[in-house]
Image: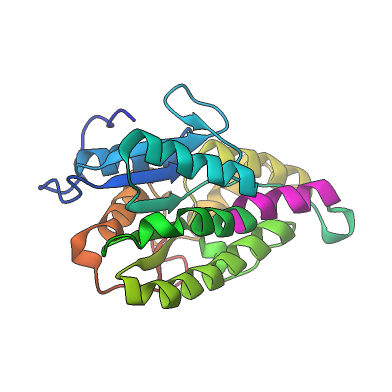
Amino acid sequence: MRPRSGGALAGDAPTLEGRVAVVTGAAGTLGRAVAGELTLRGAAVVGIDLHGEDCVHADIGTAEGNAAMVEAAVARHGRIDILVLNAGTQHMAPIAEFPDDEWHRLLDVMLSGPFFAMRAAWPELIRRPGGRILVTASTSSFVAERYKAAYIAAKHGVLGLVKVAALEGAAHGLTANAVAPSWMRTPLVERQVADRVRLLGKPEEEVVAELVGEQAARRFVEPAEVAAALAFLAGPAASGITGTCLPVDLGALA
């Protein structure tokens, strides 16, 4: 993956030199920021997505796609040290109208997929001390919201999975953690703005103002801020942190 330009939030030293990172959802706004941040810190990054010219194309909502992802990364670099499970998707509808296929699609991408990824990559991640599992969770991992049954269920569930991975990985020097961003101005959120306009019957300006108003800093979180948090958890300074979720939420949960 190509590093992003700038790097104001990147570490001053290449703390991930010699490490190989796999990043899912790498063609999206946050995925590109994470891949760029890890690259700036010295890691060799393998981006995974359904599309994107710099990415390995794999369906991480399936066991087969995750096995192919791991195989591709090992074939390219001979190892995996950092597994960043960042892929996400959304569908908003009332529970009584929530389509079966959307329920399964969201849980496949954001709950079953991370499990399949961890299982497939586990032998590589414990091959040597210092392995890292990192998951992009959400403030929706802690609170609920109308019309987002599948997303809320997946984001709550993946934190339990992270804790189990932390316990099982501890003896091998493997840590597992998550970050919980709040609202970022990404295409995924832009589509939710349109959904909220439709479902809540409010004008777009009011919907956007409400999203910003949920955050104490009265602005959207920047993808670079989330990427920097993930990069910290991937590095040696976070070796004593495992089984936890770090909010990057501008005070939303507070």
Q: Does the magenta stretch include residue 4?
A: no
Looking at the image, can residue 106 be seen? yes
> Which residue is pictured at 55% across the width and 36% down the height?
187
Q: Residue furthest left?
A: 13
Choose top left, top right, bottom left or bottom right for residue 116: bottom right
Q: Is residue 109 magenta?
A: yes
Quadrant containing the C terminus is bottom left
List x then y, in percent, for residue 26: 45, 37
Along the horizontal axis of the image, is 36 left or right of 75?
A: left
> Which residue is pictured at 34% across the width and 60% down the height?
132
Asked if residue 90 is positioned above or below residue 177 in the image, the reply reads above
> Which residue is pictured at 68% across the width and 55% down the height?
107
List x then y, in percent, for residue 109: 62, 49
Would you say the magenta stretch is mainly helix, strand or loop?
helix
Magenta residues (range): 99-111
> Which residue is pictured at 49% across the width and 25% down the height?
52
Q: Residue furthest right?
A: 96
Q: Residue furthest top?
A: 53
Q: How is the image coloured?
A: rainbow
Asked if residue 144 is positioned above or below residue 94 in the image, the reply reads below
Asked if residue 96 is positioned above or below residue 86 in the image, the reply reads below
Along the horizontal axis of the image, is 212 left or right of 188?
A: left
Q: Nearer the viewer, residue 200 or 165?
A: 165
Choose top left, top right, bottom left or bottom right for residue 115: bottom right
Quadrant containing the N terminus is top left
Q: Nearer the viewer, residue 204 or 95?
A: 95
List x then y, in percent, for residue 18: 19, 45
List x then y, in percent, for residue 102: 77, 47
Q: Nearer the viewer, residue 215 or 185?
A: 185
Looking at the image, can residue 99 be seen? no
Q: What is the tally of numbered marks visible in this picture? A: 0
